[in-house]
Image (spheres, rainbow, N blue to C red):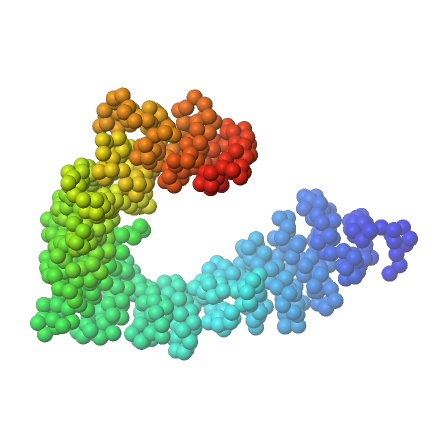
């Protein structure tokens, strides 16, 4: 084709625009031919052509729209030409995507696609474009296609028949699903079955990062689109279930779980027994745990389809399944019994009527076995099986979307007394104890099942397992979890029965150095308390009792140490400090557990109830006439106490933090601790320098770790109540790097400075910019300075 010299000077896109404009003006075929040649020679693309046509294609004027119709006809005429079919399909895809594409053109376009495009002659990418055109037509012009009646369904099946490329199947499955749901497909169900189910199950694995990757979920959506598939699909499912690979079995079982509810009760009744016979093999003789799980889910789907929730008389197949499981449970020690319990548990998750049948048959059977002397050796298995059924009931009633609860069904009322008896007696026997603890946990979590008296009876049995003489350390975590669970709904019961027992196990003074058993006992008890006392009432009791115990142990240490030689005092001090440390650590652990469990709403009040008592305890020790005999001067105790204070201060609002901070700064600058301790330490003239003074005694300076703790926990908007903050921070730095500073004191000082600077960097930028180089040149760089002072300076500079 000749191109004049003027056109040769144009860019390809300009030539495209010129040809479009000429065609719109003259409607001449030569301009269309020029556009097709340009696309074929890749001077420009169909997208460029469509963009140039855009205003005319979307215009409302009849003349422009008729030209768009002409373009549509032109593209349709090019569909049977192998040289032009690809650009023609791309052009059609763009046209049908336009909002102004006329419904009157839908039928002719569809028929043209069927008549002129030989799908088997084209590559995947070309077929994919055609499928996208069909997808757009189905999405935007569904009613027109429905109006074609059987012709559309017949021709659609002929188009997609034989497609095997996963990228195209991904799109086709979504189209199939819409057609199967929206169209009357009963007459063509076998055709759709043939073109859809021939890909089931999908066993290939798409390559990584494949943008077209297809999953089994896409196919399952199509397979479950129509109830008419049922009688054709189920035999195929059963055939494929006989495969030897776990992946195929799981895919089949998952597909059945999705499809059976759609196929409906009639299909389930027709094939129910056959399905159960096939599925139960995968439960009682599973290839692996995942296959067993999917088989149980398929059983649940089958039973729910057979017996909808509103039916009061379950299908006879359900009774058959229960009977089979009960028969297997006659030998509770066999491995099949475990699978039978799983089947019964699956049935419990279906409908109220079926739950009632399972409970009425299974619970009495298991309890009868438990009471049979001939089955005494199998009681651990029996109790475990009971526990598993109770777990399922607990989960069913606890589900957020559960349509029922125990109060509505009350299925266990007739068996409750016997259940409690079996569980409580099993708690006393080593072989059955673990299973009984699990059973108890599930019983107490079925809300509305146990009365307070019945719950108290079980708690008494649990408390017996907490006795120091009870050799059950391997079960302590399970037991504590159980008691903690009970405390969530009945804290007063635990407070009145369990806590007195635990606190009674705590000595008033540290065990003697040779009393290893007593030390191990209080350590176990404190661990129990830190785990158990999370609810508000229980934690309050913990704080009161442990605070009192702390003060008692610390106050009785000096008299115990009087008159003993140095070695005896050292030994006694070490064990007493260990006990106090354990008490403080219990408070810290309990605070952490409360925070992690989101049960920390009550922690702020302990800024008044606990923190002043701790300050009083340590201040009195540091300022006593004989600090060396005061237990609370031990730096290890100061460290763990600072952790307790930090956790309490963090939970308080800014206003409360500011109040404490005012008392804190005043106390540590003046040695008047009355306000900080709520009057527990009298406000008298200080007899020793304040802790923040460089010349203060070591025991007084050590208290600064208790000064640092609240500052670390301050919110960003809480400011230190000092007149000159940079000057105060400089003093803390000097204090922390003084020659008489211990590692504990230095760390406290550096924590204070770094915390304040990080939280108030904008207002302290000048201080930081001048302090860092100045501090280095004065405290670190001079070679003649004291080595320890230089080391301390380097540590401060890095903080």
- Would you identify the image quadrant in which residue 427 lies? bottom left
Q: Is residue 225 left or right of residue 113?
A: left
- At x 85%, y 50%, the residue is 10
One can see residue 735 in this view: yes
Q: At which x and y percent is residue 442?
A: 21, 56
- At x 61%, y 59%, the residue is 133
Q: Using the image as rendered, state which of residue 547 and residue 182 is in the foreground.
A: 547
Count of all numbered marks drawn on residues in the image: 0
Residue reaching furthest to the right: 5
Q: At which x and y percent is residue 250?
A: 40, 70
Residue reaching furthest to the front: 784
Q: Relative to 316, is 490 above or below?
A: above
Q: Using the image as rendered, state which of residue 726 and residue 471 is in the foreground.
A: 726
- Would you identify the image quadrant in which residue 340 lies? bottom left
Residue reaching furthest to the left: 373
Q: Is residue 681 left or right of residue 456?
A: right
Q: In this view, does 604 lie to the left or right of 552?
A: right
Q: At which x and y percent is residue 659?
A: 33, 26
Q: Using the image as rendered, state which of residue 499 and residue 292 is in the foreground.
A: 499
Q: At which x and y percent is residue 81?
A: 73, 67
Q: In which quarter of the image is the N terminus?
A: bottom right
- Would you identify the image quadrant in which residue 259 lies? bottom left
- At x 55%, y 55%, the residue is 139
Q: Using the image as rendered, state which of residue 25 and residue 426 is in the foreground.
A: 426
């Amino acid at each position: 084709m000749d191109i004049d010299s003027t056109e040769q000077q144009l860019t390809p896109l300009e030539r495209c625009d010129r040809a479009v404009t000429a065609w719109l003006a003259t409607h001449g075929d030569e301009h269309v031919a020029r556009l097709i040649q340009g696309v074929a020679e890749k001077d420009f693309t169909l997208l460029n052509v469509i963009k140039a046509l855009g205003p005319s294609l979307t215009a409302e004027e009849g003349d422009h729209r008729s030209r768009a119709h002409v373009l549509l006809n032109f593209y349709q005429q090019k569909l049977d030409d192998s040289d032009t079919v690809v650009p023609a399909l791309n052009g059609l895809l763009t046209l049908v995507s336009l909002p102004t594409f006329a419904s009157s053109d839908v039928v002719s376009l569809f028929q043209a696609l069927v008549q002129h495009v030989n799908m088997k002659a084209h590559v995947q990418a070309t077929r994919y474009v055609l499928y996208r055109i069909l997808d757009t037509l189905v999405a935007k012009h569904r009613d027109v296609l429905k109006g074609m009646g059987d012709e559309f369904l017949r021709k659609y099946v002929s188009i997609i028949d034989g497609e095997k490329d996963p990228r195209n199947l991904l799109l086709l499955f979504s189209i199939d699903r819409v057609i199967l749901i929206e169209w009357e497909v009963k007459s063509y169900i076998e055709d759709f079955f043939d073109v859809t189910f021939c890909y089931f199950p999908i066993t290939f694995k798409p390559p990584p990062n494949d943008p077209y990757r297809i999953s089994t979920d896409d196919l399952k959506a199509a397979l479950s689109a129509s109830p008419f598939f049922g009688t054709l699909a189920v035999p195929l499912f059963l055939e494929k279930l006989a495969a030897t690979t776990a992946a195929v079995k799981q895919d089949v079982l998952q597909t059945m779980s999705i499809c059976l509810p759609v196929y409906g009760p009639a299909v389930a009744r027709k094939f129910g027994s056959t399905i159960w016979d096939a599925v139960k093999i995968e439960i009682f003789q599973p290839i692996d745990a995942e296959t067993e799980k999917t088989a149980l889910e398929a059983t649940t789907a089958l039973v729910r389809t057979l017996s909808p929730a509103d039916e009061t008389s379950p299908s006879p197949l359900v009774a058959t399944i229960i009977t089979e499981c009960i028969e297997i449970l006659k030998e509770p020690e066999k491995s099949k019994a475990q699978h039978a319990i799983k089947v019964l548990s699956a049935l419990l998750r279906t409908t109220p009527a079926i739950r009632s049948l399972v409970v009425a048959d299974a619970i009495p059977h298991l309890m009868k076995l438990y009471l049979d002397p001939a089955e005494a050796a199998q009681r651990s298995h029996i109790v475990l099986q009971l526990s598993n059924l109770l777990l399922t009931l607990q989960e069913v009633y606890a589900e957020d979307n559960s349509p029922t609860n125990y109060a509505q069904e009350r299925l266990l009322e007739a068996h409750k007394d016997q259940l409690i008896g079996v569980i409580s007696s099993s708690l006393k026997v080593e072989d059955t104890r673990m299973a009984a603890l699990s059973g108890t946990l599930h019983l107490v979590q079925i809300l509305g099942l146990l009365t307070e008296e019945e719950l108290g009876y079980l708690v008494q049995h649990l408390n017996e397992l907490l006795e120091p003489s009870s050799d059950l350390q391997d079960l302590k975590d399970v037991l504590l979890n159980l008691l903690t669970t009970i405390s969530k709904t009945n804290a007063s019961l635990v407070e009145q029965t369990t806590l007195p027992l635990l606190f009674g196990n705590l000595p008033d003074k540290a065990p003697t150095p040779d009393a290893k058993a007593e030390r191990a006992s209080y350590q176990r008890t404190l661990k129990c308390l830190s785990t158990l006392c999370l609810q508000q009432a229980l934690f309050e009791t913990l704080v009161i009792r442990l605070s009192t115990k702390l003060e008692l142990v610390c106050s009785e240490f000096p008299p115990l140490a009087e008159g003993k030689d140095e070695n005896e005092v050292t030994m006694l001090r070490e064990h007493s400090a260990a006990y106090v440390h354990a008490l403080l650590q219990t408070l810290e652990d309990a605070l952490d557990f409360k925070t992690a469990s989101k049960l920390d709403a009550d922690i702020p009040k302990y800024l008044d109830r606990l923190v002043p008592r701790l300050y009083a305890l340590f201040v009195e020790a540091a300022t006593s006439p004989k600090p060396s005999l005061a237990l609370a001067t031990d730096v290890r105790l100061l460290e763990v106490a600072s952790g307790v204070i930090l956790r309490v201060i963090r939970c308080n609002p800014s206003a409360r933090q500011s109040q404490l901070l005012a008392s804190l700064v005043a106390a540590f600058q003046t040695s008047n601790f009355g306000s900080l301790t709520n009057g527990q330490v009298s406000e008298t003239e200080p007899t020793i320098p304040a802790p923040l003074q460089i010349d203060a005694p070591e025991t007084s300076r050590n208290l600064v770790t208790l000064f640092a703790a609240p500052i670390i926990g301050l919110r960003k908007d809480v400011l230190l109540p000092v007149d000159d903050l940079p000057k105060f921070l400089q003093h803390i730095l000097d204090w922390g790097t003084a020659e008489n500073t211990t590692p504990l004191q230095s760390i406290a000082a550096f924590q204070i400075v770094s915390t304040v600077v990080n939280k108030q960097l904008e207002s302290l930028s000048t201080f930081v910019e001048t302090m860092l180089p100045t501090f280095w040149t004065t405290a670190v760089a001079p070679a003649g300075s004291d080595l320890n002072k230089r080391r301390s300076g380097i540590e401060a500079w890095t903080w």
